[in-house]
Amino acid sequence: MQIFIEKDYDAMSVKAFEVIKEVISANPNAVLGLATGSSPIGLYKEMVKDHKENGTSYKNVKSVNLDEYVGLGEGDDQSYVTFMRENLFNHVDIDLSNTRLPNGKASDLQKECDDYNAYLDSLQIDVQVLGIGSNGHIGFNEPGTAFDSVTHIVDLTENTIKDNSRLFNSIDEVPKQALSMGIANIMKAKLIILVASGKNKADAIKKTVRGKVSEEVPASILQRHDNVILICDKEAASSIL
Ligand code: F6R
């Protein structure tokens, strides 16, 4: 694992952007694995800025996202598909038909997971962007998720519901379930970039980098991937300094 410790969130975002830009420059048909949440917003801002200033094109890029809340989808403010459109897709020249997230409003959620998984199996993710939960989750793979898991329906933990409630009007509005790529899907990416910012990630980062590889800390599996770049700000890195 390569580790970069940057002075703050903005510097973390610029570093992550440099890695993504290198991938897209080398391969304009790259497949990007994308995440939502606070951690990659700065990265997406850098990608949009670069697209506008330097014309970097996403015309032939494909994207797949890690996850989506059950019950939310297109047209819902809090859905991850809306997040991706507002933070990235609407501001670059990516073809929306080349972007895909699990559909949290599918009538048959298990079939949606199976279809999403078949789609993932038909691709090779060139670079997967990850954030990390304060409990060590990646995607919505909560502690205890099998390392060989593929796209599945997740019951979110109280911890995650509480962490994510900041983005909803009240904690009661946070969906209790999500659809998420599994750990095995994530581990198939050629390159993984994990971005982490803030003190509340420090313990999870320590366990990810230095802890025992255990299903109790989903991100610890990254120790077994041979091409991971961890980019932290100082606060998130405070327990490994
Ligand atoms: C989001 C995702 C989650 C987040 C994690 C951190 O698509 O898969 O694993 O990356 O919950 O969220 P933030 O960045 O909001 O702290």
Image (tube, grey):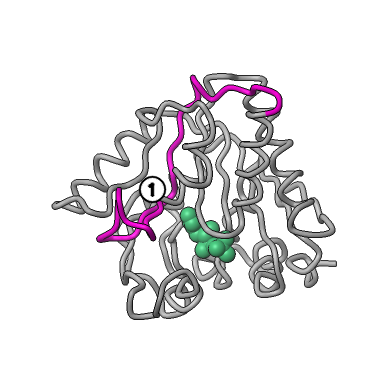
**Viewer-side residue, 231 vs 228:** 231
* Lateral position of residue 208 relative to residue 143, left or right: right
Looking at the image, is 51 positioned above or below residue 140?
above
Segment colored magenta: 53-81
**Viewer-side residue, 85 vs 3:** 85
Q: Residue at x 41, y 64 (%)?
A: 145
Q: Quadrant of the C terminus?
A: bottom right
Q: Residue at x 35, y 28 (%)?
A: 97
Q: Which residue is mark 1?
A: 81
- The spot of residue 183 in percent (x, y) is 46, 52
* Residue 120 in sight from this viewpoint: yes
* Lateral position of residue 102 relative to residue 198, left or right: left
Residue type for callout 1:
Val
* Residue 132 in sight from this viewpoint: no
Q: Is residue 156 magenta?
A: no
Looking at the image, is 18 positioned above or below residue 167?
above
**Viewer-side residue, 74 vs 232:** 74
Looking at the image, is 44 positioned above or below residue 30?
below
* Lateral position of residue 179 relative to residue 23, left or right: left
Which quarter of the picture shows residue 68? bottom left
- The spot of residue 194 in percent (x, y) is 64, 51
- Crowdedness near tag 1: few (<14), some (14–19) or many (≥20) residues, C-alpha within 10 Å: many
Mark 1, secondary structure of its residue: helix
Q: Is residue 55 magenta?
A: yes
Q: Residue at x 28, y 60 (%)?
A: 70
Q: Magenta residues: mostly which secondary structure?
A: loop
Q: Residue at x 67, y 68 (%)?
A: 211
